[in-house]
Every structure is written in structure tokens, then in C-alpha cells.
Amino acid sequence: MRLPYTTLDDKPYYHRLITAVCAEATALCTVSEASRKDILSFFPTVSPKLHNTYQSFRTDATIRERSLEHCAAEISAEFGLTPHSYFMFFGSLEPKKNIGRLIEGFLTSSSNRKLVLVGAMAWRAERELRYLERGIETGRIIHIDYLPERSLFSLLRLTRAVLFPSLCEGFGLPVLEAMNFGVPALISQEGALPEVGGNAALQTNAYDVDAITSAIDRLDRDDTLCRQLGESGLRQAIRFDMTNYCARLNTLYSAALHEKA
């Protein structure tokens, strides 16, 4: 509904569905101020019962406690990669993720690192992915449809940076996952990404390929910047940890119970 041209979903159906939810719910939960603003633009009367709890995430302890040496051995054996020799994107490959501009920006950059794309092709849009085949043929891009959590987080922990200049994100969980491991992230100024990344992520213009290229080149060359982003990302991620998330959920349920009473 927010960017109808970027999905193939039945928009009238979802409008009817959300209208019914808004009419019947005692309280409503969303995951960012950007999402809250979008919901209110369609359904302004639900403001009093609409709560932003943000999101959180928690990895399996055995995965989190794996040594970087074990992670390095895994990505070397499975993908032929060494630590920090690649950038990474993970998520569905679809127009709202801005994959076309991301790939074009990366191939235009002067980086000698690879770009690893992890995600299924959610919508085969030739215009969006016109450079993907060329990038794979030249060896600059590696595309993996699916990875188990252990392998995904091994790649994540040892990437140079996560590239996520999306056109529209209700939250942007990959950015939080990156920051939680102290991994630098490149984000756009769209949707909830500035809320999640804050000053702990490098921001760029999602619609400007030259700006994306410039940002990738900065991350490629500037070790100090990457270190600073990683350190500030760890601090930023605390805002979304389970303790803070539970407190926000408690506020929502307290409001709902009070309304019922």
C-alpha cells in the first residue's frame, strides 16, 4: 500500500483486512515510527490505540558463541571467501529492496571485494536485476538462494559491511542483526532505516546510484570509518535488545488491559 508498484500483492484485499483489524482491535502494534506514520496516513482514527514496540532479535547461543576462527574456516570451505573480502546483502531480492541500484552501484565502485547476495528471487524484474547476471559472470557477485542460520551469521560476522539501501522498510531487521555483531551497515534514508541505524550506520540516497557507489567506496577504503561504525552499532543495538523490547510490549499490553477494564 505504501509503494504499490514494488509488490505483486492484492492491495484492495490488504486494505480491507487492515480496516477490519483497526475496527476490532483493542490495541495495535507496529514496529517503527515510520510504520506508525504510514498506518496513520491510511487510518488516522486509530492513533490512540496504535503502539510502536520496535523489534528485537535473539540468535541461538551456540551460533553466537562460535569463534571467528570457526566462522572463517566455514566461509572459506563453503564459499572460498576470506574475512572482510566481501560486502553482503541478505533478504528477498525484490524491487522495494532496491537491488537493481545496489548492484549497479557496487559494479560501478572501485572495490576489489565481492558482493554476496543471500536471498531468493521474490520477483523476477528484468529492469531491477539487469546487472546481476553480468556481476556473476565476472566473479564480482555471488548469489546464494538460501543459507541455514549458522552459515548466514558466519558470513555476516566476517563481512566488510552490510549493504542495505532499501526503498521502504517497516523496520529493517538485517541492519539490527549487523549492528548486534559490530558489523558496519550502509542504509538508505527511507522508511524506518534511519531509526534503526541512527548515527551508527552510513546513510545514502536510495534513488541515486552515484551516491550508493560513493558510499560503497568509502566503506571499502576507510578502515577507521568501518571500525567506528562497528563500535557505535553495538551501542545502538542495545536500544532494541530484549530487555527494552519487553518493556515496550509491557506498555502496549498495559494499555490494552486498561482499555478493556
Image (cartoon, rainbow, N blue to C red):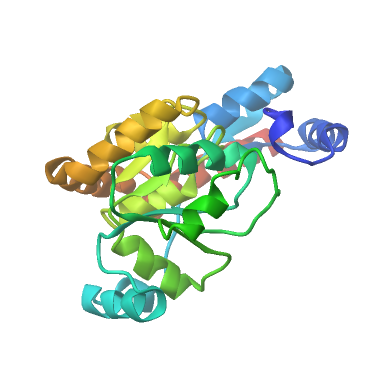
Residue beneath the point at 59% across and 23% down = 37
Vertical side of 89 occupied by 146: above or below: below
Quarter of the view holding residue 216: top left
Labels in figure, total: 0
Vertical side of 62 occupied by 218: above or below: above
The answer to whether one can see residue 106 in this image is yes
Vertical side of 31 occupied by 3: above or below: above
Residue nearer the viewer, 20 or 84: 84
Q: Quadrant of the C terminus?
A: top right
The answer to whether one can see residue 261 in this image is no
In the rendered image, residue 6, in percent from the top left (x then y), is placed at 69, 35
In the rendered image, residue 96, in percent from the top left (x then y), is placed at 61, 37
Residue beneath the point at 16% across and 41% down = 222
In the rendered image, residue 30, in percent from the top left (x then y), is placed at 59, 38
Residue 65 falls left or right of residue 7: left
Outermost residue, left side: 224
Residue 231 falls left or right of residue 128: left
Residue 4 falls left or right of residue 164: right
Residue 62 falls left or right of residue 56: left
Residue nearer the viewer, 193 or 77: 77
Residue nearer the viewer, 101 or 224: 101
Residue nearer the viewer, 72 or 115: 115
In the rendered image, residue 156, in percent from the top left (x then y), is placed at 36, 61
Q: Quadrant of the N terminus?
A: top right
